[in-house]
Amino acid sequence: MEKTIQYDLARNILRIGRIDIPGGGQVVVDGNYAYVGHMKPPHGTTILDISDPANPQIVSTIDLPDPYSHTHKVRVVGDLMFTNVEQYDRHFMRKSADLAALRGQLTEALGRAPSDGEIAQDLGVDAARIGELDAMLERGYDAGDIVRAAAERIGGGGGGRPQLAQAGGKDASKLAEALEAAVAAIRDHEGRGHEGRGRAGA
């Protein structure tokens, strides 16, 4: 028999309105509007009209084009809205960095190709999700190439692994050029079919 337990959501807070939307991460209120960054794709950002707090209304929603990223943070400055874009489930996805080497080690030790269960045991993940790591590598980018292209425009450098990289520079006046260079590097990877490397993660 199913048992339901009710918990107080908060103390000393009076609920005056309600609206059903996907789970939110960060919520920012600016004037008569609330901006909600959602935790799970494909939901991106929802903008709510809260001029009548008892009757909030959805003004706009921005959905993500795929399930691989999420935008759970949002900020508003004047008439500009800023969101983050991060790899969704990135702590799990970063395990793909060890996948090829681990397969090689297990193949040598076992004298045969390892099963997903054997790989999963060494990675500490569910065997049913090994396919997700393989798929991520297949569609991925090389984060090191992307950040290096951007850093060159601002007089800096960077690098790292295909799945995670960082960079910096000295000339902040050329940040716009750096972003354009990063976008160009991403498009170049897409044009080359990613070469089976890991998706860049934040």
Image (cartoon, helix red, strand yellow):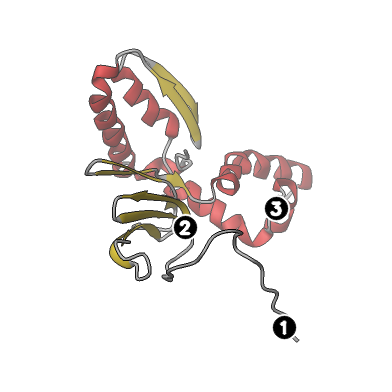
**Eye-nearest disc, 3 or 2:** 2
| Quarter holding residue 45 | bottom left
Q: Secondary structure at mark 2?
A: strand
Q: Which residue is mark 1?
A: 2
Seen at 69% across and 78% down, the residue is: 4
Q: CA distance from mark 1 to mark 2?
A: 27 Å
Q: In which quarter of the view is residue 58 placed?
A: bottom left
Q: Position of residue 183 (x, y in %)?
A: 28, 36
In the picture, measured across the screen, residue 113 lies left or right of residue 57, that is: right
The image's mark for residue 140 is none
Please identify the quadrant where the N terminus is shown. Answer: bottom right
Q: Position of residue 30 (x, y in %)?
A: 32, 48
Whole-number angstrom distance, CA of label 3 to CA of label 1: 33 Å
Q: Residue at x 30, y 14 (%)?
A: 171
Q: Nearer the viewer, residue 36 or 114?
A: 36
Q: Nearer the viewer, residue 110 or 87?
A: 87
Residue in front for this viewpoint, 196 or 6 = 6
Q: Which residue is mark 3?
A: 120
Indicate the amino acid at tag 1: Glu
Expressed as whole percent of the image width and height from the top left, the position of residue 23 reads: 49, 62
3 or 1: tag closer to the N-terminus: 1
> Which residue bears the numbered disc 2?
24
Residue 3 position within the rendered picture, expressed as x and y whole percent measured from the top left: 73, 80
Q: Amino acid at mark 3?
A: Ala
